[in-house]
Amino acid sequence: MRMAVFSAKPYDRRSLEAANAAHGHELVFVESRLGPDTAMLARGFSAVCVFVNDVVDATTLEALAGGGTRLVALRCTGYNNVDLAAAGRLGIAVVRVPAYSPHAVAEFTVGLILTLNRQIHRAYNRVRENNFALDGLLGFDLFGKTVGVIGTGKIGGLVARTLRLGFGCEVLAHDLHPDPDLIGIGVTYVDADAIAERSDIVTLHCPLTPQTRHIVNARSIARARRGFMLVNTSRGALVDASAVIEGLKSGQIGYVAVDVYEQEADLFFEDLSSEIIQDDVFQRLLTFPNVLVTGHQAFFTREALGNIAETTLGNATAFERGEDLVNRIGPPATA
Ligand code: NAI
């Protein structure tokens, strides 16, 4: 089928073209993000393929439907950027990649914790300037520390397992659906307040929903252990970034590592090194020595890109053939 691939980067093109040899779709790559202003570029395409920061709201979906699009194929896991109710109303099917490599994100998360704790990012810069002093690089043992994992699905489950079995951490978890296998290895499920109160490190792995928006906020930060580490590789809007800045200034938060940011759509995946960044909250975050920010790269492994391409094109093939869409996301249930 004809598919317009939005937000297409060179690596998307390479992985999708390689996987398409087995599918034979007509892929057209568009660098722009999909949104109300660019939806007309999809006119005549029965499918669009989008990523995390494309805007698939009701206005965009109406324009897509008017241009003949019947399938939105997300090449990612999270789908908070899609108005599923509008898609359902307009008869547009929405499919996603439910899991492409939870290992990629889980391993990156552990990497962030180690880098930030042991200040490897700062050590790298120091040594390049022949500064071999250790002052300011003091870290802590992960062994025996308490880590709170919010959301223990595929990614959070792996993070919990790695920290528990690999590093000997005490692991507390919070999820709507506790995982008996994690309980079996000594993970303890508690409520969200207990995560805040008892954890040395809090790491977020739940999806962004109305219930989880700003789950880390001024109140939860105030409840937390003084000097705790916050890690977010899930979705930016799980965290109130302004409250985090206040927490960092007061010392209530000791470390922050984030791969996602609430307003990242205006920043991430682009080279803005010659631009003046207008987002003052983001710029303030970057000024702290105990903050490590990466630009939504946790998913970015060879294996993940290959799986994303294969599943996305497989979803399109299944749609074209009228087969059962196993990776379809339905509209939210109405009360
Ligand atoms: P998953 O669906 O396997 O796990 C999510 C877990 O969160 C589930 O166990 C669910 O019960 C739990 N959950 C849902 N609502 C909750 C709530 N209100 N409180 C506590 N727990 C709740 O998803 P997976 O694959 O582990 O991905 C997690 C998130 O990671 C995705 O939603 C996505 O936003 C993010 N992600 C980030 C990537 C990156 O590159 N930084 C790449 C892939 C995913």
Image: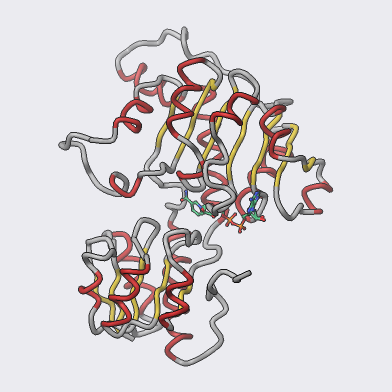
Q: Where, by quadrant of the figure, is residue 44 drawn? A: bottom left
The residue nearer to you, when weighing 7 against 246, is 246
Residue occupying the point 63% across, 56% down: 154
Q: In the rendered image, is residue 303 in sight?
A: no
Q: Position of residue 47 (x, y in %)?
A: 34, 79
State the image coordinates of residue 30 (x, y, percent, origin top left): 23, 67
Quarter of the N terminus within the rendering? bottom left
Total marks drawn?
0
Give the residue displayed 45% in from the left and 44% down from the top: 236
Q: Nearer the viewer, residue 1 or 208?
A: 208
Residue pictured at 48% horizontal, 33% vertical: 257
Name above or below for residue 105 compared with residue 82: above
Extreme-left residue of the structure = 274
Q: Quadrant of residue 66?
A: bottom left
Identify whether 224 is placed above or below 162. above
**Which of these two is toward me, 63 or 114?**
63
x then y, percent, for residue 331: 53, 72
Residue 258 in the image: state x and y as whole percent.
46, 37
Q: Is residue 24 left or right of residue 319?
A: left
Check the picture and name the quadrant holding the C terminus. bottom right
Residue located at (35% from left, 45% from top): 264
Q: How is the image coloured?
A: secondary structure
Residue that lies at the very extreme toward the right in this rendered image: 184
Left of 265 or right of it: where is 137?
Answer: right
Would you say 139 lies left or right of 58 here? right
Q: Look at the image and tell me whether residue 216 can be seen.
A: yes
Q: Which residue is outermost to the front?
A: 335
* 22 to 13, vertically: above or below: below
